[in-house]
Image (cartoon, rainbow, N blue to C red):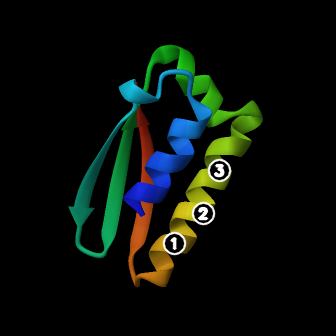
């Protein structure tokens, strides 16, 4: 799941080397925290939040295949 998330985020942002993904396991739930440049946050969120919703849906689908849950947070 982490590799998938890294791939998607790195394709969207202008400075992929500054994208930091931290993984926080909490029982059956994994929380991914995404730290980005201020200028890249808008690219990941997208118009009306459509891009981030799509990423979260794909992440949840991938997690459910492994019998887990996943959440994605953007940290400023």
* Residue that label 1 marks: 62
Nearest to N terminus: mark 3 or mark 2: 3
Q: Which mark is residue 58?
A: 2
Q: In percent of the image, x 35 and y 43: which residue is there? A: 33
Element at label 2: helix
Depth check, front residue: 66 or 16: 16
* Residue that label 3 marks: 53
Labels 1, 3: front one: 1
Disc 1 to disc 2: CB gap under 8 Å? yes
**In this rendering, position of residue 53 left or right of residue 25:** right
Alpha carbon separation for disc pair 1 and 2: 6 Å
Q: Is residue 30 above or below residue 6?
A: below
Image quarter where the N terminus lies is bottom left
Alpha carbon separation for disc pair 1 and 3: 14 Å
- The percent position of residue 67, horizontal first and vertical second, equals 40, 84
Q: In percent of the image, x 68 and y 43: which residue is there? A: 51
**In this rendering, position of residue 29 left or right of residue 3:** left
Element at label 3: helix
Depth check, front residue: 2 or 33: 2
């Amino acid at each position: 799941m982490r590799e998938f998330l890294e791939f998607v985020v790195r394709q969207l942002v202008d400075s992929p080397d500054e994208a930091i993904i931290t993984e926080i396991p909490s029982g059956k739930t994994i929380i991914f925290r995404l730290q980005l440049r201020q200028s890249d946050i808008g690219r990941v969120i997208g118009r009306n939040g459509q891009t981030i919703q799509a990423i979260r849906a794909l992440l949840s689908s991938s997690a459910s295949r492994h019998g887990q849950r996943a959440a994605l947070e953007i940290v400023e």
